[in-house]
Amino acid sequence: MPPIPMTRRGLITAGAAGLALGGAGLLRPAAAQVPVALQLSWLHSVQFAGSYIAQKNGWWRDAGLEVALLQGGPNAPVEPPVVAGTALVGISAADYAAAAVAQGAPFRIIGVAMQKNPFAIASLPDNPVRAPADLPGKRIGMAVANTPVLQALCRLNGIDMGAIQIVPTQYSAQPLLAGQVDCLLCWETDLPVAIEMQGLRAETMLLADHGYVLHSQTYIATDDSIANRRADLVALMAGEVRGWDACRADTDAAAELTVAMFPDAGLDLETQKLQARRQVPLMFSDLTDTQGFGWWSDESVEATIRTLSLMGRTVTPDLWDRSILEDLHG
């Protein structure tokens, strides 16, 4: 398949990223391919479209990397391959990273893809949840494992969690559509999309808009890799930056590429297009427009640490390491 079609804006952005990479003196001869792996956090979908764009267009190859994109899933945790060195970088989240570090994992967060956490509460317009104050008296469908997320939201907003009825459900929109629950705890980018693909409108309340700050879709690497494989890390992250800038410029093309690359994944093109449109606004902000994709602020680290403390996790700011992005963005 030819490289993904790009808009003029995408070409300009990608060109700037390429110039930055070349200016840093990090490009290697095409013959000197270094094999590395990027461990994804879930099954192949447009959630990782920026990586697919970078791979398909040969941007990593041109930088001297042969990148394998390792599919994640319920039985494929991200952190162990990174610790073991099977993957150079993994896509995780601050809560998972904090849990692993508490058990001795020697890695740090080197990039933050999601500028806003994607957790949301989805409901229907005839019985909407638009603010945390709407939750008492409601039946919320969710995985029991996500109870700490709801607890943190309630504590941040002074809501009595005991007034909310938790209904354990499978990860599906069906319990809401069938009237078994009043709302769902989910990601902004999946169950609301499933609802809209059935011709209905979903009300979504982003937890991030109500104090729940937790870095998500974070890039993790070991201390050893940060110290000894910096050129590989910078080249890998340069491809991610370039790929996600291109995805932002043309989300439909990114969805088309995703479906074409994984024909056996059961992906529906229109669903992937809608998911990409909902995902990209969570990944870019005024901060990334100024500093570049993957950047984060000290304030968001402080807020993430506060949220993690409400979930029983204690971390310090040195879990985050900006040095790879600083090398990349100059």
Image: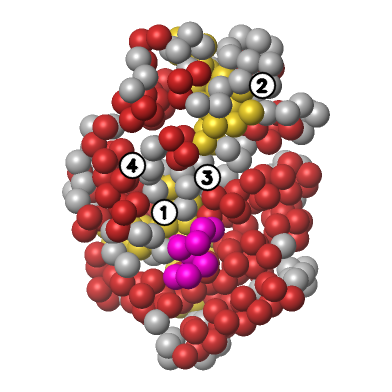
State the CA–CA distance, disc 2 to disc 1. Answer: 31 Å
Badge 2 or badge 1: first in the primary sequence: 2
State the CA–CA distance, disc 1 to disc 4. Answer: 10 Å
State the CA–CA distance, disc 2 to disc 3. Answer: 27 Å
Report x, y in % for residue 3: 73, 72
Query: What type is the residue that disc 4 sits on?
Result: Asp
234 is higher (above) or lower (below) than 193: below
State the CA–CA distance, disc 4 to disc 2. Answer: 29 Å
| Magenta-highlighted residues | 284-294
Badge 2 or badge 3: first in the primary sequence: 3
Report x, y in % for residue 55: 61, 69
The magenta stretch spans residue 287: yes
Q: Kindly identify which numbered label has been placed on residue 168.
A: none
Residue, disc 2: 124
Residue 95, quarter of the rendered image: top left
Q: Kindly identify which numbered label has been placed on residue 218.
A: 1
152 is higher (above) or lower (below) than 56: above
